[in-house]
Image: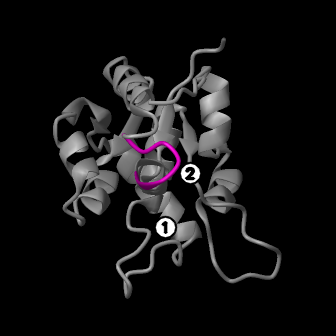
Amino acid sequence: MKRNKFCLDTNVLIQAWNTYYSMDLAPRYWDILDDMAQKGTVFCTHEVRREIEKVDDALKLWIKKRDYLFRDITEDVQQHVRDVLKAFPRLVDTTKDRSMADPWVIAHAKAEQATVVTKEMVTPAGSKKIKIPDVCDTFGVRCINDFEFVKEVGITFTARRR
């Protein structure tokens, strides 16, 4: 298996935590993510942390104990953010305070030659919205969804009755 790094978007963590990989259904998934973060294979930006911390829930507590999951901003990352926002100024919706982490996720992934993992999908032709996969495609950053990520890193699940 090829060793790669993965930069996780906020929605990958929030949706997994609240639904299909919730702690009561798939606690081992979070153990594996934690292990991968400690090894530097999986990481997030501090902007992702800020987005998660907006809600006072168990995910906020989980990330609070994992500083090693988050990467600091480097000059290289800052330059990539400038390039992303210059090419796609509408990527961030400042009026609704949404998608604030998006340029940082892409920039960190580009700086570390990592793959972006996001729930976002390529924008349909003719749409005015800009999504992470659209920007990644333009900047040559590999982008996959969380199910592709699970398969690629070899995570499997076992079902049993309680």
Q: Residue at x 36, y 51 (%)?
A: 78
From this view, report whether residue 125 is shown above or below residue 29: below
Mark 2 or 1: the one toward you: 2
Q: Residue furthest right?
A: 125
Query: In which quadrant of the rendered view does residue 101 lie?
Result: bottom left
Q: Main secondary structure of the magenta part?
A: loop
* Residue at (23, 57) in percent of width and height: 57
Q: Is 152 a magenta residue?
A: no
Q: Which mark is residue 118?
A: 2
Between 71 and 25, the one nearer to me in the picture:
25
Say which amino acid is labelled 2: Thr
Q: Nearer the viewer, residue 160 or 33?
A: 160
Span of residues in magenta: 18-23
Task: Give the x, y percent position of residue 120.
Answer: 61, 60
Mark 2: few/some/many CA within 10 Å (<14, 14-19, 20+): many
Q: Position of residue 27 (x, y in %)?
A: 39, 32
Q: Which mark is residue 85?
A: 1
Viewer-closest of 71 and 88: 71
Residue 47 screen position, x and y as percent? 31, 56
Give the residue displayed 46% in from the left and 60% down from the top. Answer: 102
Q: Could you tell which of marks 2 and 1 lies nearer the N-terminus?
A: 1
The amino acid at mark 1 is Leu
In magenta stretch: residue 22? yes
Q: Residue at the spot x=39%, y=35% of the render?
A: 43
Location of the N terminus by quadrant is top right
Q: Which mark is residue 121?
A: none
Left or right: residue 98 versus residue 61 is right
